[in-house]
Amino acid sequence: MIPAQFDYHVPGTLEEAINLLAQDPDGTKVLAGGHSLIPAMKLRLAQPQRLIDIARLRALSYIREEGNMILIGATTTHYELESSDLLQNICPLLPDCARSIGDVQVRNKGTIGGSLAHCDPAGDWPAAAIALNADVVLAGPGGERTVNAEDFFVDLLTTALQPGEILREIRVAKPQGKFGHAYQKAPHPASGFAVVGIAANLTFNADGSCATASIGVTGVGNKAYRPTGAEAVLVGKKLDDQTIAGAAAKISDGVDVNSDLYASSDYRQHLAAVHAARAIKAAASRAS
Amino acid sequence: MATKYVGQRVKRTEDPRLIKGLAHYVDDIRLPDTLHVCFVRSIYPHARINSIDTSAALAAPGVVAVYTGKDIAGKLGPVPCASALPDLKVPDFRPLANDKVLFVGHPIAAVVATDRYVARDAVDLVMVDYEDLPAVVDVEEAAKGTTVIHENFGDNIAYKMSSGEGDVDAGLAAADHVIKQRTLHNRLAPIAMEPRGVLARYFPGEEELTVWSSTQIPHLLRTQLALMIGIPENKLRVITPEVGGGFGSKLNVYGEEALLGWISMQLGKPVKWIETRRENIQATIHGRGQVGYIEIGCKNDGTITGLRYNVFADLGAYHQLLTPAIPTLTGLMLSGAYKIPAIQINITACFTNKMATDAYRGAGRPEATYIVERAMDLVASELGVDTAEVRRRNFPAANEFPFHTATGLEYDSGNYEAALDKAQQIIGYAKLREEQKKARDEGRLIGIGVSTYVEICALGPSAAMPAGGWESATVRIEPTGKVTILTGASPHGQGQETSFAQIAADELGVDMNDITVIHGDTGVVQYGIGTFGSRATAVGGTAVLVAIQKLKEKAQKIAAHMLQADASRVSFEGGRYSLQAATAAAAGTSDPVVPVGEAPAGALPEPETNGRSSLTIQEIALAAHIAKEIPPDTEPGLSATYFYEPKNFTFPFGTHIAVVEVDRETGDIKFLRYVAVDDCGKVINPLLVDGQVHGGIVQSIGQALFEEVVYDEQGQLVTGTLMDYALPRASHIPNFELDRTETPSPVNPLGVKGVGEAGTIGATPAIVGAVVDALAPFGVKHLDMPIRPESVWKIINSSH
């Protein structure tokens, strides 16, 4: 509960942060809220020599529209996303996911960029990012690159971020046409993390059938993923109970399902199916 | 006594400083030149220590000293165990391990450094060479003794004990039905919001040691620390500043407390240790931890004929202060609220490679209540009778008190049916059962759980306690009329600064704001026992009351002297001593005149009594201090001390009813209603009582649905942080519908019983009963705690 010694830097600009990071990319961690990193440091599971605190870079905290895109700065807090009227109107999955995270204190300090970059297998944001087919913009000494969310989450606590890179922005295409969003979650009673979390982003044809289905699943495997088999069941169909159940049954196909004290893999797999059905149903009922 | 304050929902006078962050806990006390201590603790549940190399740690800049078991050998006594049971095996538990470690978190070395971070870093530099040994984790396995933890004992059984009255074999033989059930009572971590903390400062010139500790028992701690450290008790002062919760976990004497005092004496500087949450879960006592076998017999009409409970108690590796005593409290309360002619408990108390269990809110009684209440549910289910009705049929009637139980207790007073009636009425029991039936027909899983508990409080007569069961109070009226109360109780969240002031304000007829309640400083307060066992108001509050009555006897004499009348002619009301009417007329006096006059600088004003017919108690206090106008045979000053010895325990009771709905798909459990009708005797402050009940029910919800200290098969603690150990959160808690019945206790003049533990005792069986009832359509009769959604889902899933 008492971390090892570290140096602490508060850069004034992103450029300064990148320069600081370049000095010792392996011994440095970027701090962006600290609700995962600080506990890990207190338990000495993480012992970085330096922290670069970008949470105070207010220039990286924004939610705005640009053409057909929604741009979200990396240090935007969960609370800012939860309470954004703009997002509630144009992309309700983001506030829906945000309000399921931790508790009020966590949501006031924790950031979307920090959560995505930490890549906790039970984090909520990775599911939403995958369901929304989001891109993340990574800034490094050599400039910027954009990575799709599905490619960004590589493995347990491992992302496509290269040493020296900082996650700067999240980009989401504005949902078009008739669409419905929902995030459904079984929270762990102690940690609040997702035992399973299902983000559903569905679009519908004029006849009410499902046009596209994009689902993000967290908590179930070693990283968040897209259950393509389940999505395929939905596309082109009217979402009656039978169709939804058919999709839900495939939610963890091909995934090595996690097991812990609270939920065995059998139970977790079952919970994933139940919450998938609930998420799909909720998204369909909210479609407009 | 006029009751201007007693019985009112008076807001806690403690709260403003707590809410504003102005309270002082141990860690808020900062002394110059303080050194900081961190502990090297065992990472193994059971291992031999081949060697400890402290050289690298000692060489680290800022490290002042590193102490191991060898350094304290012969200098620091063992951690005390106050339980005296026949043939009890008491292992030698030193503050730092010697050649073996017996649980994860067992202290091995103390690192002392100039700051806490340096000390913590140096902990990692202490090299301990362990030889891993097989761990004894399961308590029933422990009883078999395949691996022996304390080799000198030959087995792992700390003691075996049987108790109870009546012929249980005959009772069970006479029964129409005998029901058996195995039950697990999950091990819990008390998790006080403020972890433990100690600051010790030795004054070499005065040869005095002051220890600030977050404890519930400052005086008992002082006595024990004096013995452990070998310092005269009158050279040791224990101060408990603000204490952020205890729940029994600070009703103890820990090795760290003695070590810190001793280290301060070695180094001549203040030393501080603040427990981390991880240490708190590893090495502060746990609670509960029983595996038991119930046998209950009943007639066809539901009459209970006998109860047997064979229990394996998981004591952990060593005894803390009261570790062995806790299962015996379970035995005492096995009669519950019922007439049971024959009861027997057979305890097999075992050592395991885990932290010691000890008193956690309820301390043995939640276990007993759970056993009896689960047994009543099983009887109801066996007979097909409503679970509340089975209970009702076995209650002693209100006129059968004092009621003797087959566990050897005399219940002081009670009206169990009244509490059950009230709870059933509030919840609309009959209608609720109809709704439940309808919901079941629709496929919904709704369950109703009932608990009609009795608990034992006001611990307790000294005859039944290891170190005295009385409590003390000093009440003093200062020359300026302000009232100071020194209580030997040690409130740490219960609110007795408020409730004791309410009692005193009414009894003295003064404003509550003129009263200060002081506690928790052995340098200031007369010897006391402390706060635990729901005793502070019933025993400590009574001590305050009787001390005031003593003080008033003296004040009455002084008043009579000043009013120039016989004491029998002076009456007291509303804070004022007055000549009775006839006497006043004869003396030709008039209404009171407030004394006004010029006094020489520095002199106290003197009360003007000439020609007056009455005096306030404050005026008498001033006169008593100036001592010019008091009767010749009277001591100056106005204070009284009383050590109150209770005649018996008290026995609060009540009915809790929980209504839950189980999610068929996920196994999630949701509360629909929660009604609690508690009877804790006379109520001093309903707001405080409600608060105690709320907190207790929350901890019960924790035990029933969420909390469990889990050691894996190798003895590793796997719920070592609050990310894994699930404490209930606000979002898990339903709205509580609280009410009361009020059956005064005849045991003390206040008529109070105690309420600190009622919630953790009464609520757990109601919650478990409700979940079991919800799953009755699946043939479920019992579930072990904590009832996690997965276990519920497995039942539902396996029925398909």
Image: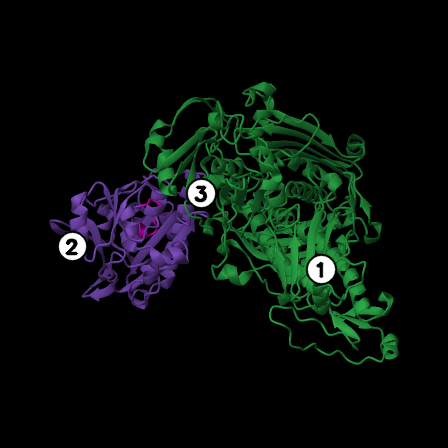
Residue A284 point in image, percent of width and height: 36, 60
The colouring scheme, among rainbow, by chain, secondary structure or one colour, is by chain
Q: Secondary structure at mark 2?
A: helix
Q: Is residue B594 magenta?
A: no
Q: Which residue is mark 2?
A: A15
Quick check: B391 left or right of A282? right
Q: Are marks 3 and 1 in contact (CB under 8 Å)?
A: no
| Cα separation between marks 3 and 2 | 38 Å
Quick check: B69 left or right of B171? left
Q: Chain of mark 3?
A: B
User: Which badge, 3 or 1, is on the more N-terminal residue?
Assistant: 3
Residue B75 point in image, percent of width and height: 53, 28
| Cα separation between marks 3 and 1 | 47 Å
Marks 2, 1: nearer the viewer: 1
Residue B554 point in image, percent of width and height: 78, 60
Q: From what the image shows, is residue B485 above or below residue A8?
A: below
| Cα separation between marks 2 and 1 | 75 Å
Q: Which residues are magenta?
A: A120-127
Q: Which residue is mark 1?
A: B637
The residue positioned 28% from the left and 65% from the top of the image is A90
Q: Chain of mark 1?
A: B
Residue sitting farthest toward the front: B600
Give the number of the disc on residue B25: none
Residue B382 point in image, percent of width and height: 70, 41
Colour green maps to chain: B
Q: From what the image shows, is residue B147 above or below residue B696?
A: above
- Looking at the rendered structure, the kind of residue marked 3 is Thr
Colour purple maps to chain: A
Q: Nearer the viewer, residue A193 or A172?
A: A193
